[in-house]
Image (cartoon, rainbow, N blue to C red):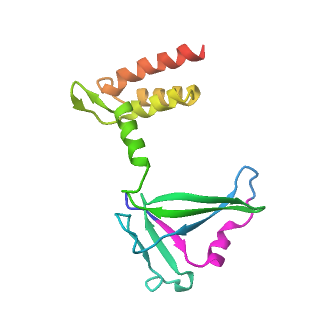
């Protein structure tokens, strides 16, 4: 999937999208991004496309999906919140060790071979978070949408039983 995050260098352009929401349970958020084009390390590509855009007054900058941002500050205002973020490289990412631990914990090794995380792995994370209602729906959906000879199918039965044990 090729996805891009469209941003603007001009706050007044971004402010257009932070108008008051009609829904009580929604909050508009303005993201302020600090991104140095000379940043050391491997960051996902981003580019100022103002000269290529049909709307050059927007001063549009595109960030590639998967870019890693650290939250610097969150400011809550009446009509919207502002989240200040800074672009970081993959090497500086503290999440690498976290992801490696999750892969070992929920994917890990089986019979000396590394196995990939699966849909059952995601369900197990929900289960460990004690989100039994979501976990039950998740495993039942996997069960009904997979073939009976699929390796996820048997695991779903076991996991549906585990959820039922904790909720009854």
Q: Is residue 8 magenta?
A: yes
Q: Which residue is nearer to you in this view: 22 or 105? A: 105
Please tell me in which quadrant of the rendered image residue 84 appears. Answer: bottom right
**Could you tell me which quadrant the N terminus lies in?**
bottom left
Q: Is residue 85 magenta?
A: no
Tell whether 15 sits left or right of 50.
right
Residues rendered magenta in the picture: 5-21
Please tell me in which quadrant of the rendered image residue 10 appears. Answer: bottom right
Residue closest to the far left: 112
**Could you tell me which quadrant the C terminus lies in?**
top right
Tell whether 100 sits left or right of 85.
left
Q: Which residue is nearer to you in this view: 33 or 50? A: 33
> At 35% from the left edge and 27% from the top edge, which residue is drawn?
152
Which percent across, then down, holds residue 86? 51, 64
> At 37% from the left edge and 57% from the top edge, which residue is drawn?
90
Count of numbered badges drawn on the protein: 0
Q: Which residue is nearer to you in this view: 158 or 69? A: 69
Tell whether 4 sits left or right of 137.
left
Which percent across, then down, holds residue 83? 62, 61
Which percent across, then down, holds residue 20? 75, 63
Relative height, residue 79 to residue 147 (above, below): below
> At 48% from the left edge and 17% from the top edge, which residue is drawn?
162
> At 40% from the left edge and 56% from the top edge, which residue is drawn?
92
Which percent across, then down, holds residue 52? 43, 83
């Amino acid at each position: 999937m090729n996805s891009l995050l469209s941003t603007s260098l001009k706050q007044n352009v971004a402010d257009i999208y932070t108008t008051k929401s009609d829904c009580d349970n929604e909050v508009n958020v303005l993201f302020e991004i600090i991104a140095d084009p000379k940043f050391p390390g491997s960051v996902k590509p981003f580019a100022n496309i103002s000269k290529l855009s049909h709307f050059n007054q927007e001063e549009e900058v595109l960030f590639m999906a998967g870019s890693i941002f650290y939250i610097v500050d969150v400011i809550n205002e009446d009509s919207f919140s502002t989240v200040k973020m800074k672009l970081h490289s993959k090497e500086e990412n503290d999440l690498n060790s976290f992801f490696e631990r999750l892969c070992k914990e929920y994917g890990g090794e089986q019979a000396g071979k590394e196995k990939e995380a699966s849909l059952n792995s995601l369900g197990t994370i929900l289960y460990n978070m004690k989100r039994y209602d979501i976990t039950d729906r998740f495993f039942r959906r996997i069960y009904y949408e997979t073939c009976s000879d699929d390796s996820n199918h048997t695991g779903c039965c076991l996991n549906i039983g585990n959820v039922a044990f904790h909720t009854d």
